[in-house]
Amino acid sequence: MTTRTIGVALLGLGNVGGGVVKLLEANAAAIEARLGARLVVRTVVVRDPDKGNRVVDVDRSLLTTDLEAALARPDVDIVCELMGGTTLARTAVLAAIAHKRHVVTANKALLAEHGAEVFTAAEHAGVDVYYEAAVCGGVPIIRVLREGLASDRIEAIHGIVNGTSNYILSTMTETRRPFADILKEAQDLGYAEADPTLDIGGGDAAHKLAILVNLCFGTTVDVHAISTEGIDVVDPIDLGYAEKFGYVIKPLVIARAHGEEADSPIEARVHAALIPNNWLLADVSGAKNAVYVQSYALGPSMYYGAGAGMLPTAMAVVSDMIEISRNMFARAGAHAAPRPRPAVARPLIPLSDIKTQYYLRFGVSDQPGVLGQLMTILGAHGVSIAQVVQDGARGETVGPVWVVVLTHIAREGNVRAALGDIDQLPFVREPARVIRIAGR
Ligand SMILES: NC(=O)c1ccc[n+]([C@@H]2O[C@H](COP(=O)([O-])OP(=O)(O)OC[C@H]3O[C@@H](n4cnc5c(N)ncnc54)[C@H](OP(=O)(O)O)[C@@H]3O)[C@@H](O)[C@H]2O)c1
């Protein structure tokens, strides 16, 4: 009996594309045994076929710059978009769908920005779009949410989904060196991009959160409406105070349903947060990723592993190819709904209305009565205090002394209003540092 084959077109042969070729070779026998078929790369679209030093050696005759011809090949069943970006990637994915090819992509930016268009086109064409590698690289969180927890109701998720930000904050925590130094070091080591804006500014995490929100809460959120803050607000001073209070600071994505109804509002935000150091997420360090899911029936569960890298990401891509192949063999095709249909649009709670605890660090002159005035203004805005630490006198020449406050749960709008008043006071030497506190 001849072995069945599934033809694959790879769009991109960089880190992930190269990893896919490597993994298909290294695990060929196991994949064939599990699938009962071989996955065969028919063609690879690249920008420059003559580029040297690729991560894998590929038969030169497979390389092409002709995207349209690659998509039209009759021996291609699955198109793997591994180029990145949102312009050509969008055109390529929509064209692949128009050619009735199933699609695998690792591209979170594409799905966060154009997901609705892509999934609608796929549904009409009756093809699958799989995207496990787009969130947390090799950690199979998409499959967990789509399948493992398909019968559950997700209440909240807390995730560490950007390895670069986690690496930087973890290293800052260990060494107490400043953000800029660690970022430079991460760039030199190849852990951070030359332009790190998307990673450290929270944009990459927001793309991933938009995808997670869709899977968890069955609604589409505008990625630009997600409150997104970078990790560059964190100073080694804050890491020291966090430790004193029993916390660590992590780059988090948070999403939560407010109410049990299908149309009840949700909150979604990206920012660095203090988390209790006895929480599982506190141990997710270095470039690792994790998502902590709170769901109605299962309760808490956490998914942890490598959120990027050649082989971990390629593993997720190839597993998607296997899943699509199984759908093809079962003739399930479009029945394998790529993601929930948004039955109702769920409103996003404005940041000013979210309620959480806050870490506030005030830089003030060392003079009597300061603490009392800070407390009075916070109290007047309904912000009550859980803990306070006041630095000893350091003398005017060395700069401000710190008053650090942990609040009870308060409304963000009230905290901001209080800080607006406090920042006007004559003894305030620099604007208050605000970091939200997250807990289970
Ligand atoms: N790297 C990771 O760990 C990781 C993890 C999760 C998800 N992802 C996602 O996976 C995707 C790929 O990432 P990567 O790190 O593999 O990127 P990469 O190393 O920069 O590779 C990009 C590949 O796409 C090709 N390409 C780019 N523009 C092209 C164009 N206009 N026409 C034809 N080919 C083009 C390049 O061709 P040349 O080689 O000829 O330049 C290269 O082979 C991105 O969406 C990324 O967000 C990456």
Image: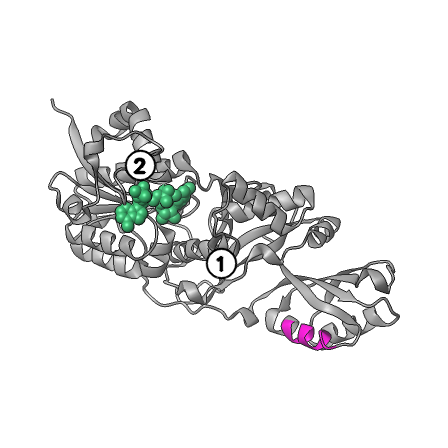
Residue 134 position in % (x across, y down): 38, 48
Residue 35 position in % (x across, y down): 24, 30
Residue in view at x 74 percent, y 62 percent: 405
Amino acid carrying label 1: it is: Ala
Residue 110 position in % (x across, y down): 33, 55
Q: Residues within 10 Å of mark 1 (few under 14, many from 20)?
A: many
Amino acid carrying label 2: it is: Val
Q: Colour scheme used in the picture?
A: one colour
Secondary-structure class at tag 2: helix
Question: Distance between the Cα atoms at labels 2 and 1?
Answer: 29 Å
Q: Is residue 98 magenta?
A: no
Helix, strand or loop: magenta stretch: helix
Report whether 141 appears left or right of 353: left
Report whether 112 appears left or right of 121: right
Q: Is residue 421 magenta?
A: yes
Which one is nearer the viewer's eye here, 53 or 369? Answer: 53
Q: Which residues are magenta?
A: 416-424
Which one is nearer the viewer's eye here, 148 or 176? Answer: 176
Secondary-structure class at tag 1: strand
Residue in view at x 22 percent, y 32 percent: 60
Which residue in the structure is indicated by mark 1?
255
In the figure, residue 121 lies in which quadrant?
bottom left
Quick one: label 2 or label 1, which is nearer the N terminus?
A: 1
Which residue in the structure is indicated by mark 2?
318
Instruction: Establish if 267 lies above or below 109.
Output: below
Instruction: Establish if 160 lies above or below 382.
Output: above
Q: Are marks 2 and 1 in contact (CB under 8 Å)?
A: no
The mark found on residue 295 in the picture is none
Nearest to viewer (mark 2 / mark 1): 2
